[in-house]
Image (spheres, helix red, strand yellow):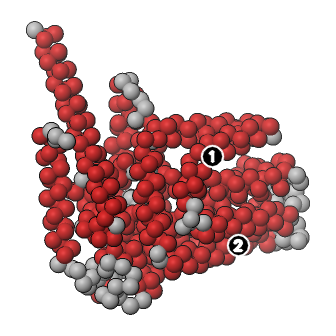
Amino acid sequence: MSDSPTSSTSDSTSITSVHQTVRRSQQNTDGSQVVASESRHWRDIFWLGIFILHLAGLGFVLAVFGLNRFKISDRLNIDRYTEGLWENSHGLTETYWPMYALAGGVGTILGWIWLLLLGSHVNQMMKVSVHILTTYLAVISVLCFWCAQFFWGVAFAIAAALQFVYVMSVIDRLPFTMLVLQKAVKMVWSLPEVMRVAFAFMLVMLIWMTLWSFGAAGVVASSMGDGGRWWLLVVLSVSLFWTGAVLCNTVHVIVSGMVFLVLIHDGRQSPSMPPKPLMKSLQYAVTTSFGSICYGSLFTAAIRTLRWEIRGVRSKIGNNECLLCCVDFLFHLVETLVRFFNKYAYVQIAVYGKGFNRSARDAWELFQSTGVEALIGYDCSGAVLLMGTLLGGLITGTCAGVWTYTKWTDRVIMVGSTAMLMGMVLVGLAMVVVESAVTSIYICYAEDPLLIHRWDAEFFNQISETLHQRLQHRSARVREVLTHNQLDGHTQETQSV
């Protein structure tokens, strides 16, 4: 295969950078400098304080709302302060709490099933997540219209259309994505201790959800009008999302640290492997690095989702220059944000104990200097895992919503949407184990490709070939844009003459 001059230059630059990182890594073959425990300091302490204060304050609010309607209507006499403003109805917390208990149970079972089937049926599960999600969203849209919930029916119909467009735009990338996910599962399956970590954090999340759902059930049963209920539920949902993201990313840091150590030491049973690596990763994640996890969890998920959607739309625009210009502006804006908020930062946090922004920036600069960023842009493993998380959340929300519909038709959307979020958080805690392995593999490949070669030579050849093809594709796109701009300039000069 002949290479163009531009492509050759790009490839040679990437290879040179990789060789430099190989030499740096080979100087640390004993692993003593890979995880420098002595240099660990507390990072992003401000955000750690904010998160703890948020948990304490929200816990108090949840307890108040739940207790106010528990067994006795207006137990704490809150309604006297809202006389004439709210409905002053007589709902009870325990009326809606069982629906949330069902949501927690279904979400936990789905997460456990996913983890248990991880080694044997991962390909089938991923394909179901990708191809069934669109249909499921459309079915829920029809159910919302049937229940006269027209706003939500339209919202789910739009979501189904966007999901279908995105899958069609990345359909050619799915074989490579499934390959990466298979290898990530292979790595995770060889580390049963990280599976136990995921189970343990799901239990921790369930404990918090017990209090959260108690307060949410109290809000649904409260004397407020629907507008007040919705605003409070939105605030509670944002809090649950942040808490869930913090726990997911804590697992992310723990698993990333373990995977990086396994790759750098050539195996779990290597004599050079440090003692109790899982406990050290756990210790760093819940102490010195916890502030960075709290900070990154606020923004990373939203920015990643926006980036996937813009990439999918951008690839389907065609020659509409006006629309392409607008989308390109949004694309470059999101790409700038990705430099400071990306999931690969958690690997740097796990391995080196850096602050979040520095970790994100260093990871992105590493990818760009080695050309691996082109490979990451081609991979859709994060989006596929998100689809599985969404599907789990939708199933959970549907179960809780159907039970609510049999008793109180006017509370279906309130209970169903919040139950869906509970399911997403619980299933996401299972999914993050594989995502952590994927991010660690890319970081290791960028820092030292020989680490991947020693672990799985066939996979190394496949990923290297894909990277070479993506770099060639990028060079061809650059030449095409330059040629187009030159032709436009020449045309304008000719017209002016």
Which disc is residue 35 wearing? none
Mark 2 and 1 residues: CB-CB less than 8 Å, in contact? no
Q: Which residue is mark 2?
A: 211
**In the image, is residue 334 above or below residue 169?**
below
Please state, as top left, top right, bottom left or bottom right, where the N terminus lies in the image: top left
The residue depicted at 33 percent of the width and 55 percent of the height is: 462
Q: Quadrant of residue 120?
A: bottom right
**In the image, is residue 473 above or below residue 106?**
above
In the image shown, does 284 or 2 lie closer to the viewer? 2
**Mark nearer the N terminus (2 vs 1):** 1
The residue depicted at 14 percent of the width and 59 percent of the height is: 16
Residue 396, image x, y percentages: 71, 58
Q: Which residue is mark 1?
A: 132
Please state, as top left, top right, bottom left or bottom right, where the C terminus lies in the image: top left
Query: Is label 2 in a helix, a strand or a loop?
Result: helix
The residue depicted at 88 percent of the width and 71 percent of the height is: 71
In the image shown, does 56 or 313 lie closer to the viewer? 313
